[in-house]
Amino acid sequence: MSPDEFLPILQARFPQVEFRLDPLNPQALIMSASGVPEVFGWLRDAPEAAMQYLEFSTAVDRPPDCLCVVYSLYSYTHRHRLALKVDLPRHAPTVPTLSHLWENADWNEREIYDLFGVFFSGHEDLRRLMMPEDWEGHPLRKDYSHPNLTPRPD
Amino acid sequence: MGLMDRIPAYVDRLPGGSVVMAPVDWAINEVQASSMWYMLFGLACCAIELMATGAARYDFDRLGMIFRATPRQSDLMIVAGTLTLKMAPRVKLLHEQMAEPRYVIAMGGCTTYGGPFYHDGYSVLKGVDKIIPVDVFIAGCPPRPEALLNGCLAMQEKIRRNKLGQPRGPAIHIPPTAGRFSLPTGTAETERDPQIPG
């Protein structure tokens, strides 16, 4: 199934969650954060979706007010793929964890927490993954600054 | 090297003392220079060149160099690759675990001054000489095996100039050799801190 085929199914099944097609990416749907664990649980377990594999999850920082978490799902059964984007408020990005659905979400979410500062509620071990434990700030935010960063002389 | 530091100070004062010390220096230096066992230790892409230099085609063994998988048995640390701030305390610990006399070769641009990450790398240490004393800097990104061999020969020459009880000479810079990529030699200050022994 393609995202535009998924869209009416998801809208009928989860009326409280907003879904829309991504105008920039034909492979993606944009959804609201309110449906995060339930929609993903359904996508994994429903036979018509059967998304056994969370390919990756990452984040995109879009100042001034949006921080977008991106999930990519793949089904070995149907060999189809779906990307889901969740827009979060940049000042307090919080989204429920998926680590109880897919094991690899554990470290993916730790990485996103480390580099973007997204808080995954319900995650059992939300520590920094890449930076030292006592690091301050989240380096992949667009407004990140550090004494080691120096302007290029051109 | 407590005792070894004091002996030359007494012997040198005797008439003809330097004549006695010269062969002692020669013997100690020759032994050290011809068996520089390096630590099996790599951080990034420079380690690939280090492995290539240790393998059959370039053959570190002809300089008497064999890798040791423990700092306790190593004489030489070749810091090969990008040194991140997270890794830096571990590298310092490994260096401290090596027995005296210990030598350090900083291989490539990253370990010399930060390399390609100098401007944009928030997590990269700008020069391994900020945490441990370095004897030889090798330029290149990564250095060719020829450049690494050149650096090890320079390291041997430096060991052969050692005198007991006197501080080691300043760091040596190996310029980039002919290769696919090369970077400037670097901006790191290379004055050796006389407070740091060995």
Image (cartoon, coloured by chain):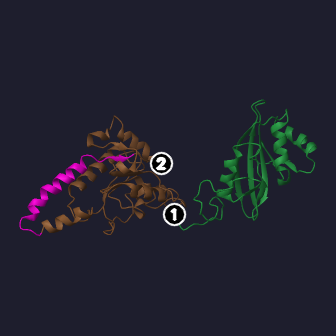
Chain colours: A green, B brown
Label 2 SS: loop
> The magenta stretch spans which residues?
B13-39
Residue A9 shown left or right of residue B91 in the figure: right
Q: Nearer the viewer, residue A112 or B97?
A: B97
Where residue B140 sits in the image (x, y, percent)? 39, 51
Is residue B59 shown to the viewer in this render?
yes
Q: Are marks 1 and 2 in contact (CB under 8 Å)?
A: no
The residue to which callout 1 is attached is A152
Where residue B70 sits in the image (x, y, percent)? 40, 47
The residue to which callout 2 is attached is B44
Question: Is residue B164 shown above or below B51?
Answer: below
Q: Nearer the viewer, residue A22 or A72?
A: A72
Q: Amino acid at mark 2?
A: Ala
Rendering quarter of residue B167: bottom left
Residue located at (59% from left, 57% from top):
A131
Disc 1 crowd, CA 10 A, few/some/many (<14, 14-19, 20+)? few
Residue projecting furthest to the front:
B3
Q: Nearer the viewer, residue A38 or B140?
A: A38
Name the subunit of mark 1.
Answer: A
Q: How many marks?
A: 2
Question: Is residue A120 shown above or below A9?
Answer: below
